[in-house]
Amino acid sequence: MQLATTDTGSGPSLVLLHGFPLDRTIFDHQTQVLARHYRVIVPDLRGLGASPPTEGVYTMTTLADDVLETLDALGVTGPFVLGGLSMGGYVALELAARHPSRLRALMLMASRADADRPEAAANRRALAAKVIEARSTEPVIDAFLPRVLGESTKQHRPELVAHVRTIMQGASLLGVVGCLNGMAERANHTDTLQGIKVPALVLCGEEDPIAPISDCRAMTQSLPQGRLEVIAESGHLITMEQPESTTNAMRGFLDGLSA
Ligand code: MLT
């Protein structure tokens, strides 16, 4: 599937993949700043944002194939820098495992390399079933909104909480169900990390329970050219909770690639 995509700026290609149940606007700050020096390509993943939903399970392979089809249509043939936040990182690792020659560098943001444990996978499938039964994505918003934002944000920034809720409300019912079931069956890419020979930046929110610092550190150590940066006073959604420091970390890494 060709995805609804923002394609802006010029220079080396940078592709950014958003998390669940979100859309490309989580990268608005990064897109605006980095497009001064890079061609920034930011799709909405299948069934989320403005990309249409389909029936069925959205495996990470399906989502990675959508990204490649979209890049082909945009004429991006050479290696690109690939960044993914959380579920976007799961998709990025799938793409890295299958098409290593396409990568110039990798950025894993608030993400993980391992698969769901059986209980976590069962919880996701149960949540997907609840969404279908309720004919509403509200159960997912209720479950994810408190998880993706850090304590600092929840306590002091009600307008950002409301904004993220609005983004989540844009996710289609089929899209939410497809992604939940897809994440539940995703592969364990812990062993993939050591085969990723390109430079890799791991970004981690200080207050993130989904991808905690200890796990991000372990991932970084497995990456041959891994580098870890912790974003202070942020939960999972680093690109929105701390846009400036996240963009600066990305900019430093990207500029270092061409130095
Ligand atoms: C995300 O932000 O994409 C999700 O929290 C990922 C997950 O639930 O594992």
Image (cartoon, rainbow, N blue to C red):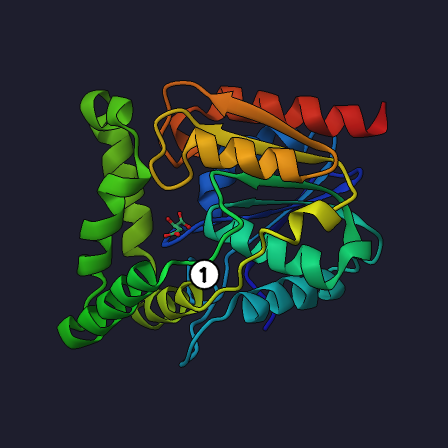
Q: Nearer the viewer, residue 62 or 210?
A: 210
Tell me the residue that label 1 is attached to.
Answer: 50
What kind of element bears circle 1?
loop
Number of marks present in the image shown: 1
> For the view shown, which residue lies furthest in the bottom direction?
55
Q: Nearer the viewer, residue 18 or 6?
A: 18
Which residue is located at x 20 percent, y 28 percent? 158
Which residue is located at x 49 percent, y 64 percent? 186
Image quadrant in which you'd find residue 26:
top left
Q: Quadrant of the C terminus?
A: top right
Q: Nearer the viewer, residue 110 or 19?
A: 110
Which residue is located at x 78 percent, y 41 percent? 198
Image vertical order of residue 4 relative to residue 54, above or below: above
Instruction: Pinpoint residue 132: horizontal percent, then vertical percent.
Output: 22, 75
Instruction: Pinpoint residue 167: horizontal percent, then vertical percent.
Output: 33, 48
Kind of residue indicated by mark 1 = Ala
User: In this view of the protein, can residue 15 be seen by the observer?
Assistant: yes
Q: Nearer the viewer, residue 136 or 194?
A: 194
Image quadrant in which you'd find residue 175:
bottom left
Image quadrant in which you'd find residue 178:
bottom left
Question: How busy is the neighbourhood of tag 1: few (under 14 within 10 Å), some, or many (20 plus)?
Answer: some
Instruction: Pinpoint residue 159: horizontal percent, then vertical percent.
Output: 24, 30
Q: Is residue 83 left or right of residue 75?
A: left
Which residue is located at x 30 percent, y 35 percent? 149
Q: Is residue 136 left or right of residue 90?
A: left
